[in-house]
Structures are given as structure tokens and as C-alpha cells.
Amino acid sequence: MGVNKKSCEVFTIGLFLLSISSSLAELPPAETNASPQRISVLAEARERSGDLLGAAAAYERLIALDPTKQMVLAPCLVQIYAQEGLTKKALSWAHVVMERNPEPQAYLAGVHMMLGNLDEAQNILERQLAKLKEPRQKLTLGWQLADVYEKQENITAAEKTLLDSVKSAEGSMDENAAWARVCWFYDRHGLLETRKKEWEKIVAEAPGNESARRALAAASGLTRRYSF
């Protein structure tokens, strides 16, 4: 049986309004009835003072008064709630952001990374990467997955993912950037000089090996930046 799109929209709106109504209880009565301009000033002041949950309550009130502010404020709410460790609220607002995000799964994985849910971020990215065909999307998603592996201290998986990303960018304008990312990774883990010698050997034996040449160029560029 097919899913009724209208019913899904009504359900999503219902969840959104429930989230908003719960936040109103966190605002004092006088502030609940304040103008949008007053609440906006209040939210900024609370955020500057470090009262992030107070700022979040004010931001949610602003969205209730003016839904057009949702696109701007929803990502702020995700970040605040993730920073405060409020997983359910962070993910609830993340799904709002995902509706208009061009790469929703990558965004959701990023939220899980902020929350420290590295295994969930890994699962999301691995599934999405397996579906992708477009080279640039595979490249950027591969970088994100490599970051997750690195945070999990799975250096082998991170290296393989970065090298796979190079393959997806091969022959394109992104290949140099892909090799630069690999070199930064090697440098962080004390492997850059070892890999440079390996690439130099490959170029000496096969001067036409373009990948090894690009890798060496990226490594040399990184070394030059650190040399002054």
C-alpha cells in the first residue's frame, strides 16, 4: 500500500508544532508574549552570555511567530542541542534541515558526528557512498567517511577510503585536491616521508605514472608550506 504524502506532511507539521510548544514552556511568560524583535535581541544576548538552551528556546519562539525564519535558525538549533548533548532535540531539528539540504544524508551523518555517534555516522555514510555514482559527491562523502574512521582510530580504513576518493576523482579537476587530502592525512600520522619515497620509486621506474606524479606534487606542496 502506498504512503499518503499529504498524511506524512501533516504528521511532520504535527511533530514540528509539538517541538515548538514544548519550547515555549522554557520562556518566562513576559518573554513568551514579546515581539519578534525583542525575542531576537534576547536570543542573541543569551547566546553571547553562554546560555545556549535559553537562546534555543528564544529561537524556537521566533520560528513559531515567523516560520520563514526556520531555514536560518534550524541549523543553529541543531548545533546548540548537539553541543548540549540533547540528542533527540538535535536530531528532530536535523530532520527539518534535511528537507532542504542538497545532501541530507551527509548532513545527518555530520550531526551524528557532533553528537559523538560515530558508528551511526559511519553506517549512514557507508550506505550512501555505496549508492552514489557522481564522482564529486563520492569524493566529498569519502572525505567525510575517512574523518569518521580517523576519529574511531581506524587508520587503515581511513587511508583506504581516501585512496578510493582519489580514484573517484582521477582525471578530473578534483584529483589534485584529493591527493592533497591524502598527503595531509599521511602527514598527521607521520607517514608522509615514507609515502614520498614510495612515490619517488614508482616515478623513477615508470615516469609516465601520472597518479604518482600528482601525489608527489601534493606532498611537495605540503612540505613547502611547512618549510618557512
Image: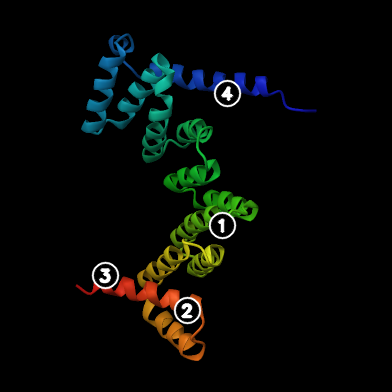
Question: As shown in the figure, which amino acid type bears the numbered disc 1?
Answer: Pro
Residue at numbered disc 1: 135
Category of crowding for the residue at label 2, using alpha-carbon neighbours closer than 10 angstroms: few (below 14), some (14–19), many (at least 20): many
Q: Is residue 143 above or below residue 176?
A: above
Mark 3 or 4: the one toward you: 3
Disc 3 and disc 4 in contact, CB within 8 angstroms: no
Q: CA distance from mark 4 to mark 2?
A: 51 Å
Disc 2 and disc 3 in contact, CB within 8 angstroms: no
Where in the figure is residue 56, as x and y percent of width and height?
Answer: 35, 27
Query: Going by the image, does 200 lie left or right of 2?
Result: left
Question: As shown in the figure, which amino acid type bears the numbered disc 4?
Answer: Thr
Q: Residue at x 46, y 43 (%)?
A: 111
Question: As shown in the figure, which amino acid type bears the numbered disc 2?
Answer: Ala
> Where does the N terminus fall, quadrant-wise?
top right
Q: CA distance from mark 2 to mark 1?
A: 20 Å
Q: Residue at x 60, y 50 (%)?
A: 128
Q: Is residue 111 above or below residue 191?
A: above
Q: Residue at x 40, y 72 (%)?
A: 186
Q: CA distance from mark 3 to mark 4?
A: 50 Å
In the structure shown, which secondary structural element does the residue marked by tag 4 occupy?
Answer: helix
Residue at the far bottom: name it. Answer: 205
Residue at numbered disc 3: 225
Q: Is residue 155 among what the camera can see?
A: yes
Q: Report which quarter residue 84 is drawn in.
A: top left
Residue at numbered disc 2: 212
Residue at numbered disc 4: 12
Q: CA distance from mark 3 to mark 1?
A: 28 Å
Category of crowding for the residue at label 3, using alpha-carbon neighbours closer than 10 angstroms: few (below 14), some (14–19), many (at least 20): few
Q: CA distance from mark 2 to mark 3?
A: 20 Å
Disc 4 and disc 1 in contact, CB within 8 angstroms: no
Q: Residue at x 38, y 72 (%)?
A: 218
